[in-house]
Structures are given as C-alpha cells and as structure tokens.
Amino acid sequence: MKRFGLSTALIFAVTFFLGSLLSRLYESKIYDQKILLSASAAPGDVVLAKIDQGSIDFYSREFNISWPWPRSLYARAVDYLVAAGARAVAIDLVLSEPGLYDGEDERLAASIESSGRVFLPLVFRKGEDASEGVERFALPSAPQLKRLPVRQGPVLLPLPSLRAAARGAGNAQADPDRDHVYRRIRHFVGHGGRVYPSLALAMALYAEPQLKLDDVPFAADGGLNLRFYRKESFRTYAISELIQSQVRREAGEEPVVAPAGLRDRIVVIGATATGLLDNRATPVNAGGSGFELHATALANLLQRDFIRVIDPRLQWLLVLLAIALLNLFLPRIQALTWQLAAALAIILLALAGNFILFRAGFDMDFIPLFLGLVICSGTDAYIRYQRVRREKKFIEGAFKGYMSDSLLAEIKKNPGGLRLGGEKKRVTVFFSDLAGFTSLSEKLPPEEVVRILNTYLERMTAVIMEEDGFVNKFEGDAIMAFWGAPLADERQAARAMRAALRCQEKLLALNDEFAAAGLPRLGMRVGVNSGEVIVGNIGSRRRFEYTVIGDAVNLASRLEGINKQYGTRVICGTLAAQMAAGEMILRRLDRVRVKGKQVPEEIFEVVAAKENAPSSRPGQLEPFEKGLQLYFKGDFASAMDVFLALADDAPAQVFAKRCCWLLDNPPQDWDGCWTFTEK
C-alpha cells in the first residue's frame, strides 16, 4: 500500500508539472476541436446585418456614395428594422467623430431615439483622464466578482447626440488569447467606481427581462467562454438590403427583405469588409468579425447556452483520483496485451467523457487527465517491461546451462510457466547412469575423477540440449532430463530416445579418449518414460527448482536400473514407446513390475532411429518377439529353444536362463509379468 501511494504521488507530481506546462501551449487548440465537434446552428432570434464589401461597392457604383457613409444610411436601416418589428438593434460602430455631411448625425440620432431599442458600443481605454457621460449605462447593482477587470482612463464614446438617444450601451472591447483567437468575453468592466456591462449583456438584459445575473455562471473576472455556433449559421443580411428595403417601403414598394424574417429578432449591425479592420478570429472562423463575437455572446445569454469551466482545483482532484484508480487497477491485469488494451480503452473513454461533458456545458482541461492516464499506463508498462526483462535475465542465467538456445528463447517469450507452483503435463523423462563409475572413482585421485566426470557430463549435456531437452539435475554421475516442459513437444518421446542413442555414441568416442589416456572404458544406461507429472518450480520462494515429480519420473529411474538385468543400454516404458513408434525401432522386451509398483508395465528396448537402423539388428527382433509370445503364454520350453538360438543377443540369453528356471519352478497363475524386488 505504501508503494501504491508513493507511485500515485510521483505520477501525479509529474503530471501536474507537465500538464500545467502543456496546457498553456495546447489546451486552447483542443478546446477549439471540442467547439468544432459540438457546434450547432445558431438560434434564430439573433440576426446579423453586415456592412460588407458588396454593400460598399453597391452604393459607390449606384449612388456615388463613398466610404465613410453618411449617417442617414444607418438611420434608414434602423427605421426599417423598427418597422419590421425587431426587438432590439445593436450598431457595432463607435461613431465618435462627427459625420462628413451636415445634419446626418442628427438624422441618425432621431431614428435611434424614436426606435427606443438601439444599443451602441463603448470602448474603455487605458489612460490618465476619465471620461464623462457614461454613468447612465452602468449597471444599477454591481455583481460580486473577485477579479473584476478595471479600466481607469478615457472611454471612446459615440457622439453625445447618439449616446443620448440610445436605449443602452455596453463595452465592446474583447481580448484574444495568446494565439490571437477569441474564445471568451468579459461581460463586466469597472470604471470610475461603477460597473458596466458588455454590449451583449446590455442587450440581453433588455431583450430578456427574466435573465438574472445570478443565473449566469460568470468566472471570477466576469468572463464567459463562448459557445460558438457553426460558421455562417446566423441568419445574415447585407445592410444595403435593409437600407433599400426602407427606401422601397417609403416609396410604397415591396421591400428587399421580408419583415417576417426580422420580427421579434435582435439585430446586430457590424462590419465585415476587409478595409474596416474589424477582423476577430474564432475557433469556427479564422476570418470572423467583431459583431459576430457579440452576436455569439448575446445568443449564449438568451439561450442560457453556457460553458461552465470546472474549478481547476476540482479538475486536478479528478486527475489524482483517475491516476489512483488506474494505478490500482492496471497491475491486477496479468497479460501485458490486455493491460495495454485496458489502458487504451480508459484513455479513449476519458476522451469521450471529456467531449460529452463539454456537450453538456462543462469544460474540463483534457491534457492533464490524458497526460496522467498516459503516464500511469506508461509507468505500469515500463515496470512490467523491467520485471519481464529481469525474469528473462534470471531465466537465462538460471537455465542457460540446462537447455538449448532455441528452447531458452521460446521460454523467455513466455516466462510465466516458470513461476512458483506446478501444473500437470505429459512429459518424457530421461534418466542415465554410468556403470562401474563408483569403483572407478575409488581407484583414482579426486581431481582426476572430477575431470573425467565433468568431461562426460559436458558431452552428454550437449547432446540432450541439441535435442531440445531440459537438463534438470546431476546426481553424481547420473543425469536427469525431460522433454515436453516448459514447452509442449509432440515429438518429446522420440527426441528423448534419440538423445539416449546419441549419448551412447558420444560415450564410445569418449571411451577411446579415456583408453588413450590409460583410463578404463565406461558404460552408460538410460531409462526413458512418458506420463503425466507435476511440473513447475518446486520449493520455497527463496530457493526453488524447476523440476518434475510423479510416478512417471520414478519409473524412468527404475527403467534405467533394470537395463543391467537385460544387458541393454536404453529401455523405455509403454507410453513412450507408443509416442515414438513412428520414428524409432523398438523391441518389446518384457512385462514387469518394478520395485515400488504393483501395476504391470510393458517395457521396450530402444534399438535405433528408423533412418539409422543397423542391418544386423532388425533380423533378430522377429525371432525374439516369437519367443516372447511363447514365454507370455507359459510355453517356457518352446520359448527357451527360440531364445537359445539367439546366441549373440544378451536379452535372449537372459530369457533362456529365466525359462530354464521357470521349468524347474513352475509358477502358479502365470500372467507373464516378472517382478523385480530391487532397483
């Protein structure tokens, strides 16, 4: 538990450091993608009237009116909007300087005053002198904000006649993020001890009297993230269409823009023409304009379509919780593939959850959570990799001398089979022993005995490993090996028998070396048996051995010992004979009960691999099998005649003597099974 807590704390600390850094660089771009994926069509109660290049060109071409326009053109647009039943109108132009034409400002002021529903922009600038004439646009009660932005300085105002006629006004200044993209608007600004609303908020409070400031989730600085709508989804008209509609209306003609499209709508007039320098890039439109920004903020307020930014402290708490849960959950998954799949699924779920949360109106930074999950998953994967690497090094160090490189490579791919504990498997066990080695060791110095033994064991081990056997242990001059574990092997019995025969061949060559050195020749006996055993790491956690235990192992040991009873070199059990029959030449040797077992077992002499069969031996097998069948039937006299005819065959001579004894000592209830009373 202590390690879990320390690991979680370290991962969180790294996540906090990197997440804080990367969020400042990339979180805004991820936010843009969430905006784009969740953007819907703009609501129909906000309409745009654009002062576009087409309108400027139209009046220049048709009426020789150049920019800047006479204010009466704006007045006609306002008059038509009022006549069409627009609920409110905003003119996003700071008309702070007198017009170029006499009487035009008064004409616009009259239209604004008679409408009773026009809002104008204010621009609060930094400077030394405060401006007069804005007090009436302040909010009657200031909201309680911890970080209210305050601008002490002059305010860029519309002409006195225009602002006196306006229904209201609001701050039109917006600040972009570091990348010069506009994503939020601060809806309040402090000035001269009063608080002023944004242009969008001023219009919303007028157009929607039920809107309460306490119901809006303003940030501590009065800001709101904007819920942008799909590009060009606001209903939009060219201002020239509105002006000409009023001209036609005054002439009793059909207007260009139908009044029904404007009735009870809030219309925002603003510039989109490039030369008017009102470009404001947004997540949905790199070429957006300032009045579109105000229209979006206004629509958000009217529709209560807010994006609530989750408190950063709560966000980091959720990241810590996610890291802790993942750090607790992932190590319980054993397979690395499933662990990676689970980590990927959790990360994808976090991504989907973040987007769903955004669609529901809550914004949470994605990078810290994503980074925390990735670091947690990566840390667990790295720990697993290091553990597997250590396991493979341990396996290589512990087993390199006991198996072939190819078998070792396969086991390193799946070291799970070598953990403490065992499982039942079918294996083939190989037991070998040197005949007469004990008496030899008594005659030679210990150093010479060790040298001879090491040379012998090295040669035999090499053969076993070449046949992909697992050299399990050495007990003096005895060797125990097995096939079929840790990796299953369909040819395990044949491989074990081939190894036994090749060891005999190696011993012949080694005996020539010993003879040249004046040493006696050695003989080798091998028992091979297949069966179900318990295989695995047996022992304690501090000291264990990868080995096999079971009756099949004991029988292999007994088969090695009874070679001396028949004068044979390699004997195998029944199951091993069946498994290797397709590759090996085997001779049924006897039906026996070995010491410690009551169940009879047919045993076989391993003669040769079929591709290496000697020309002389196969001819002896059929007569021997004939004599053996007579022997099993209890016809000892006939069997003895057959066996005596095989004068050069050691097992046949053993059976000839046994038949002679049985003739003198007739058995009762003969079942053809010979019982050995010693190992």
Image: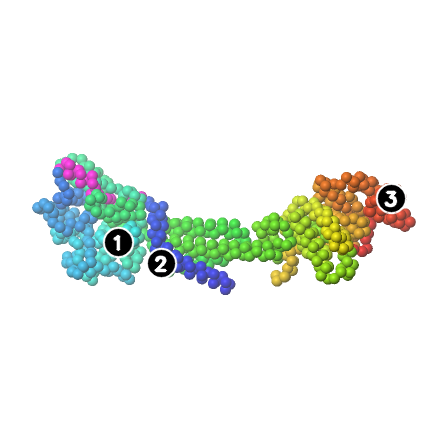
Give the magenta part as a residue range: 41-63
Between 285 and 454, the residue placed more toward the observer is 454
| Res. 412 visible in picture | yes
Residue under the point 70% across and 48% down: 499
Relative image position of residue 653 (x, y in whole percent)? 85, 47
Instruction: Tell me: residue 617, above or below residue 443.
Output: above
Between 41 and 385, the residue placed more toward the observer is 385
Q: What distance separates the C-alpha of mark 3 from that of mark 2?
A: 101 Å
Label 1, on which residue? 175
Which residue appears farthest toward the right when viewing the image?
664
Quadrant, the C terminus = bottom right
Residue under the point 71% across and 51% down: 430
Which element is circle 3 on? helix
Which element is circle 1 on? loop
Q: How many badges with numbers are in the image?
A: 3
Residue under the point 39% across and 54% down: 367
Label 2, on which residue? 311
Indicate left or right for 130 with 449 as reference. left
* Foreground disc of the pair 3, 2: 3
Say whether disc 2 or disc 1 marks the residue closer to the N-terminus: 1
Callout 1, which amino acid? Answer: Asp
Q: What distance separates the C-alpha of mark 1 from that of mark 3?
A: 114 Å
Question: Is the C-beta separation of discs 3 and 2 under 8 Å?
Answer: no
Indicate left or right for 314 with 409 as reference. left
Label 3, on which residue? 644
Which element is circle 2 on? loop
The image's mark for residue 616 is none
